[in-house]
């Protein structure tokens, strides 16, 4: 399992730092690098310890993306 926490309000990702494991907010997936979380319990603890309600945290399972179980696009989201 490869999980990331993303703030819906800022778009940033909360992940353990590759350097020392401390929680950091980064702007891109590239910056998150190997700092993905391997289990839901750790991800929930990161949210509890490091997110405010303003962050609107969302848990993303990277292994789910691009599969038949991918996150559904909201109907009409990309309509012009």
Image (spheres, rainbow, N blue to C red):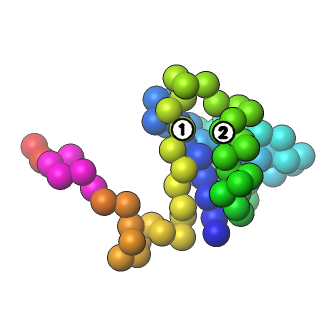
Q: Residue at x 64, y 30 (%)?
A: 51
Res 57 label: 1
Indicate yes or no whether the magenta region holds residue 75.
Answer: yes
Return the residue nearer the eye: 17 or 64: 64
Q: Which image quadrant: the N terminus?
A: bottom right
Q: Residue at x 66, y 39 (%)?
A: 47
> From what the image shows, is residue 53 above or below residue 45?
above
> From what the image shows, is residue 41 above or below residue 2?
above
| Quadrant of residue 62 within the rendered picture | bottom right
Q: How many marks?
A: 2
Magenta segment boundaries in residue numbering: 73-78
Q: Residue at x 35, y 76 (%)?
A: 68
How packed is label 2: few (under 14 Cα within 10 Å), some, or many (20 or more)? many
Residue pushed farthest bottom?
68
x and y percentages locating residue 17 in the rendered image: 79, 46
x and y percentages locating residue 58 in the rendered image: 51, 44
Q: Residue at x 17, y 52 (%)?
A: 75
Give left or right: position of 76 versus 5: left
Q: Is any part of residue 49 visible from this angle? A: yes
Indicate yes or no whether the magenta region holds residue 30.
Answer: no
x and y percentages locating residue 65 in the rendered image: 45, 67
Element under disc 2: helix
Q: Which image quadrant: the C terminus?
A: top left
How packed is label 1: few (under 14 Cα within 10 Å), some, or many (20 or more)? many
Residue underneath mark 2: 47
> From what the image shows, is residue 65 above or below residue 31?
below
What secondary structure do most residues of the magenta stretch adopt? loop
| Quadrant of residue 24 within the rendered picture | top right
């Amino acid at each position: 399992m490869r999980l990331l926490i993303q703030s819906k309000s800022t778009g940033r990702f909360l992940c353990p730092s590759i350097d020392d494991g401390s929680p950091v907010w980064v702007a891109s997936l590239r910056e998150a690098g190997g700092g993905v979380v391997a289990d839901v319990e750790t991800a929930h603890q990161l949210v509890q310890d490091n997110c405010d309600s303003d962050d609107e945290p969302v848990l993303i399972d990277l292994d789910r993306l691009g599969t038949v179980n991918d996150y559904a696009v909201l109907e009409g989201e990309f309509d012009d």
